[in-house]
Amino acid sequence: MSLDDDPLVRRMRPFGTTVFAEMSALAVRTGAINLGQGFPDTDGPVEMLDAAVDALRGGRNQYPPGPGIPELRAAIAGHQRRFWRLAYDPDGEVLVTAGATEAITASILALCEAGDEVVCFEPYYDSYAASIALAGAVRRPVTLRPHRGGYGFDPDELRLAFGPRTRLLLLNSPHNPTGKVFDRDELGLVASLCAEHNVVAVCDEVYEHLVFDGEHIPLAGLPGMRERTLQISSAGKTFSCTGWKVGWVCGPVPLISAVLRVKQFLTFVNAGPFQPAVALALGLPDAYYDGLRGQLGGKRDRLCAGLAQAGFDPLRPWGTYFVTADIRPLGGVDGMEFCQSLPFRCGVVAVPTQVFYDDVDAGRHLIRFAFCKRDGVLDEAIARLATLAVTGN
Ligand SMILES: *Cc1c(COP(=O)(O)O)cnc(C)c1O
């Protein structure tokens, strides 16, 4: 290799700077309101913040145990039982990770041989494609398309995606960026295909507590699925602390042992003083979880109404932090161009979702807005977006 060549391994070259970084930089440069990146602009529960301070001051600053501190593993198991009626043994069936991201990456690296196939729904969360590529595995996308005001998929397309090389099914519900919450029938089909093809399901459920319509149904709870499912979540979205990177994965002992083998050489451990704080937060009363859902649901309604008024065609999400919108009623054709010009036209940043599809045309006219922001910020963004319809600029 000469030094003039790109030193990056070939399998990572398709993955440039993330669109979030590009659009956030654009927001800073133009002083626009950033509804691109999905992080809250307020802090999580004060009891949790106090517990982290106590841990920092109380000498809990060294390596925690590899699988996570016992009190956090017990709290995670308790949470799974309390909300989803799923029983996991805190010793062996629960693993603490550096966010959900590490849990997903370690699961893929632990379970996929080079050339194995991973079925996933597109548009997908951006780390999925990169993690699959790192493992030398191959993604088999199934496209979610606008359907009855939300998103749906073609059952035959899903059936055809499974084959002899399929090793994993990667499912994100509630789904980022579409806000889709998979229903029982859809999950039933997914489960039966996993069983038929002897496939392990990796479920990213970081928005488990942000469902406004319908209900969150963990795939692991469907008949026969617990033994072949890794259930992943994290504190970031549920407790508004995305920078803490405390995540976890629950599953049967053989699968968790495999993931731990890889995870120990990625980060070994992380977030020592934040682990006891998240343990405390998981035990907060129902009022906390209901309050979070109520607040975010109100923001969802607020932004959807504002987008419709501004002339977009918003696809009302059932869950998550996000709403996607069709730009065609405003004369938009390409979401990437639309998002690059939006800060200059009206001072708001959104992200195009086409970058999360292999089938770029399926998402060309769709863009994503985050509504996990203070109401005043949302109102200002809505007022700015309203000028698009009025002036047509
Ligand atoms: C935010 C997000 C993650 C990342 O979670 P971390 O705990 O911050 O690693 C994973 N999956 C989806 C769908 C997300 O939106």
Image: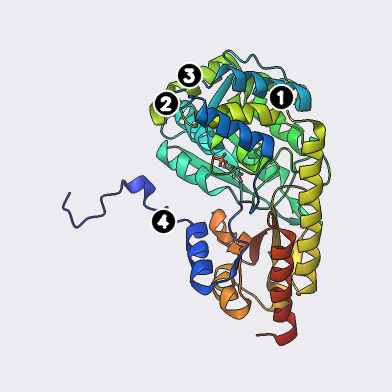
Q: Residue 61 at what x, y percent from top left?
A: 45, 27
| Of the image marks 3 and 1, the number of the one nearer the N terminus | 3
CB of mark 3 near ligand 1 (< 8 Å): no
Horizontal side, residue 131 vs residue 323: left or right: left
Mark 1 belongs to which amino acid?
Answer: Gln
| Of the image marks 4 and 3, the number of the one nearer the N terminus | 4
Q: Residue 254 at what x, y percent from top left?
A: 54, 15
Question: How far apart, in angstroms, are the residues tagged by discs 3 and 1?
Answer: 21 Å
**Residue 268: numbered disc:** 2
Question: How far apart, in angstroms, are the residues tagged by discs 1 and 4?
Answer: 36 Å
| Of the image marks 1 and 4, the number of the one nearer the N terminus | 4
CB of mark 4 near ligand 1 (< 8 Å): no
Whether residue 233 is visible? no
In this rendering, the label closer to the viewer, 1 or 4: 1
In this rendered view, identify the residue nearer to me: 178 or 157: 178
Asked if marks 1 and 4 touch (Cβ < 8 Å), the reply is no
**Residue 16: numbered disc:** 4
Q: Residues within 10 Å of mark 2 (few under 14, many from 20)?
A: some
| Of the image marks 2 and 4, the number of the one nearer the N terminus | 4
In this rendered view, identify the residue nearer to me: 182 or 343: 343
| Of the image marks 2 and 3, the number of the one nearer the N terminus | 3
In this rendered view, identify the residue nearer to me: 156 or 68: 68
In the rendered image of this protein, does residue 45 appear above or below residue 336?
Answer: above
In this rendering, the label closer to the viewer, 3 or 1: 3
Question: Residue tagged by mark 1?
Answer: 80
In this rendering, the label closer to the viewer, 2 or 4: 2
CB of mark 1 near ligand 1 (< 8 Å): no
In this rendered view, identify the residue nearer to me: 149 or 28: 28
